[in-house]
């Protein structure tokens, strides 16, 4: 079983965000692996262990996204594809999908895994678009996988607490929901092994695609607060006494 | 301009976010005269739309479209596109939309701008969408001839729908070319069990900001002190720190207690939809830009690990 895991580097949840001229200051961001993608990688590694398969990480992003590749290889992926590109934030999901597809189309992956959505731009699309471009079957919000011979059964999360088991023909592209597994940590041995694993690096411009997002980004802003919120700030003791007063006298907890 | 709104059905009812999408389309139509068409695949529900102002309602002859199937829907939309060529397709940003509309974007080779919260028209269409976990917002203008957008639940109010005349046109789709690589199984619900939080008076809710499983008692001690139930965000359940029946949000329970005390929860939309009906919300987060503060009555900027144990002692 040949599995490709799409992984992206994003700003960590606690990165300071500052904007000037409708551009986010990238220098101040603390860059990490998109957390939802670690569930996709873990599911791929579990299947690799069961089927004697091979896991390739594929990321499109700047040089710094090597970190994503190193982390993934340390956890047990076998190799990686790094498509270098500095300005993914102005690209449409469709354009990003076209670039990645062009690069991986001859690899004949049986499975392509992606995370549910990227924590920065959150389009929740990439893996599903690629399923169409490569003519793969697809499913999103996958909460369970079972593979027997060439039969793939998946459990999908639906709305309002419903689920559904479905059968997909391979090859398939799945976007994985959080909570499907418990992502592993890298071991020391894993970390040591990284330098021996192959990374295929290519600049996206070499793929010779003509791209056009179909939209322009006019503005990036900090959302305005619409509700009257009472801000409680200050020293810990001060906060504690204000909260005590609110709980006892305003909300009247017992 | 021509706009096409997809009306999704779930459990034989119209999905509320589809009606909200229709409001968005009607709003654009009021400013630029766009034709608004809708598509509904569940023919049992056609009557429910008959009083809405629509230039056309497309309904299928094909029975197999009543139940969701990504590849059949894709082919039907491909044929709708050939015949109607809408400039804008509008969907609710539902689980189903996530499952197949990105494919439609690829098939028609047009952009899909997902999870929008507002739309305006002044010589071109502009949309707003949250980015960076709703800590920032971006405004985009559509420049392509055709595009797809989807709206987050709650972006518009279905009460604002314009009523009027609607003609339905039945279409028969040739779906014989669809190679069936996806066999959709039965839908089921997992036995619920666990706690029912819907009638809780006070809830202390734990988010990822609690840091680690060993810190959960910090929340439990506070909850004991004020007779509250424990709730949580999804990552806390995913990590196995609390049982699934504690999860609040779009894939958990919907609650409306007198007090919702959010500890280290950032306020993603999927969490907010489960608790925004709470009477009073106190939220504590280290991050003064956390979106949860947008809906909180009291916003505490600080470290919960320092503040909450002291607060519990003080009560
Ligand atoms: C289809 C779908 C369904 C989903 N369903 C749900 C659902 O039902 N429920 C749900 O909750 N989520 C759901 N999610 C996930 C949701 O998008 C968010 O990822 C999730 O709600 C984030 O949880 P959180 O706020 O606990 O964590 P984070 O977003 O990581 O926020 C943690 C917060 O804690 C703060 N913090 C950190 N340390 C401290 C400290 N020491 N003291 C004080 N504050 C601190 C941080 O500043 C931050 O504000 C769903 C997502 C999708 C796509
Ligand atoms: N630039 C990228 N490189 C590799 N994978 C990506 C990239 N962008 C998105 N993905 C994958 O696609 C998923 C959905 O992302 P998105 O459509 O951007 O919300 C992510 O969770 C990743 O698995």
Image: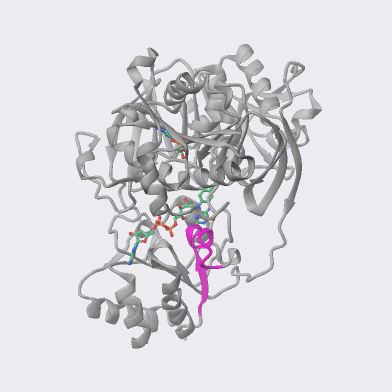
- B220 versus A168 height, above or below: below
- Which residue is painted at 42% across and 21% down in the image? A99
Using residue B10 as the reference point, say whether residue B270 is left or right of it. Answer: left
Q: Quadrant of residue B222?
A: bottom left
Q: Position of residue B27 (x, y in %)?
A: 48, 32
Query: Is B151 drawn above or below residue A92 in the view shown?
Result: below
Looking at the picture, does residue B76 appear above or below residue B209?
A: above
Residue A209 as seen in the image, left or right of residue A110: left
Displayed quadrant of residue B93: top right
- Residue A168 % position (x, y): 70, 34
Q: Quadrant of ligand 1?
A: bottom left
In front of the other: A122 or A234: A122
Position of A7 relative to B200 (above/below)? above
Q: Which residues are magenta?
A: B228-242
Q: Position of residue B130 (x, y in %)?
A: 38, 42
Quadrant location, the N terminus of chain A: top right
B229 falls in the magenta region: yes
Colour scheme used in the picture?
one colour
Nearer to the camera, B189 or B4: B189
């Amino acid at each position: 079983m040949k599995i490709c895991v799409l992984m992206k580097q994003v700003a960590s949840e606690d990165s300071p965000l500052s904007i000037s001229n409708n551009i986010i200051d990238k220098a101040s961001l603390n860059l990490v692996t998109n957390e939802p993608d670690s569930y996709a990688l873990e599911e791929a590694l579990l299947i690799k262990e069961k089927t004697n398969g091979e896991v390739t990480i594929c990321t499109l992003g700047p040089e710094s996204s090597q970190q994503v590749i190193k982390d993934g290889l340390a956890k047990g992926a076998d190799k990686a594809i790094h498509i270098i590109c500095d300005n993914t934030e102005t690209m449409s999901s469709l354009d990003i999908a076209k670039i990645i597809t062009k690069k991986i189309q001859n690899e004949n992956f049986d499975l392509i895994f992606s995370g549910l959505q990227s924590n920065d731009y959150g389009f929740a699309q990439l893996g599903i678009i690629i399923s169409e471009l490569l003519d793969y079957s697809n499913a999103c919000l996958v909460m369970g996988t079972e593979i027997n011979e060439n039969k793939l059964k998946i459990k999908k999360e639906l709305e309002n607490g419903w689920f559904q088991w479905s059968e997909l023909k391979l090859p398939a592209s799945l976007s994985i929901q959080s909570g499907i597994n418990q992502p592993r940590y890298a071991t020391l041995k894993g970390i040591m092994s990284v330098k021996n694993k192959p990374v295929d690096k290519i600049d996206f411009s070499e793929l010779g695609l003509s791209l056009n997002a179909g939209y322009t980004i006019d503005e990036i802003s900090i959302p305005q607060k619409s509700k009257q919120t009472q801000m409680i700030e200050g020293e810990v003791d001060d906060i504690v006494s204000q909260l005590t007063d609110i709980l006892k006298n305003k909300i009247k907890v017992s | 301009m021509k706009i096409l709104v997809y009306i999704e059905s779930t459990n034989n009812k119209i999905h509320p976010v589809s009606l909200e999408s229709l409001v968005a389309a009607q709003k654009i139509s009021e400013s630029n005269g766009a034709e608004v068409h809708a598509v509904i695949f569940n023919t049992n529900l056609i009557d429910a739309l008959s009083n809405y102002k629509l230039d056309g309602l497309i309904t299928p002859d094909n029975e197999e479209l009543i139940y969701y199937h990504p590849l059949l829907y894709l082919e039907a939309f491909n044929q709708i596109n050939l015949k109607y060529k809408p400039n804008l397709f509008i969907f609710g940003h539902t689980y189903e939309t996530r499952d197949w509309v990105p494919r439609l974007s690829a098939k028609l080779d047009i952009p899909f701008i997902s999870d929008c919260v507002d739309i305006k028209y002044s010589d071109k269409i502009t949309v707003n969408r949250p980015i960076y976990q709703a800590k920032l917002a971006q405004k985009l203008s559509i420049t392509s001839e055709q595009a797809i957008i989807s709206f987050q639940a709650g972006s518009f109010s279905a009460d604002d729908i314009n009523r009027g005349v609607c003609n339905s046109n039945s279409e028969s789709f040739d779906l014989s070319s669809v190679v069936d690589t996806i066999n959709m199984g039965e839908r089921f619900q997992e036995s619920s069990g666990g706690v029912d939080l819907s009638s809780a008076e006070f809830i202390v809710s734990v988010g990822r900001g609690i840091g680690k499983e060993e810190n959960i008692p910090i929340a439990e001690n506070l909850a004991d002190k004020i007779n509250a139930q424990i709730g949580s965000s999804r990552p806390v359940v995913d990590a196995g720190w609390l049982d699934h029946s504690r999860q609040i949000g779009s894939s958990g329970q919907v609650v409306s207690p007198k007090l919702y005390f959010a500890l280290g929860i950032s306020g993603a939309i999927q969490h907010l939809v489960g608790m925004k009906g709470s009477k009073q919300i106190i939220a504590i987060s280290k991050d003064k830009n956390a979106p949860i503060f947008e809906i909180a009555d009291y916003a505490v900027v600080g470290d919960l690990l320092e503040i909450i144990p002291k607060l519990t002692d003080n009560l």
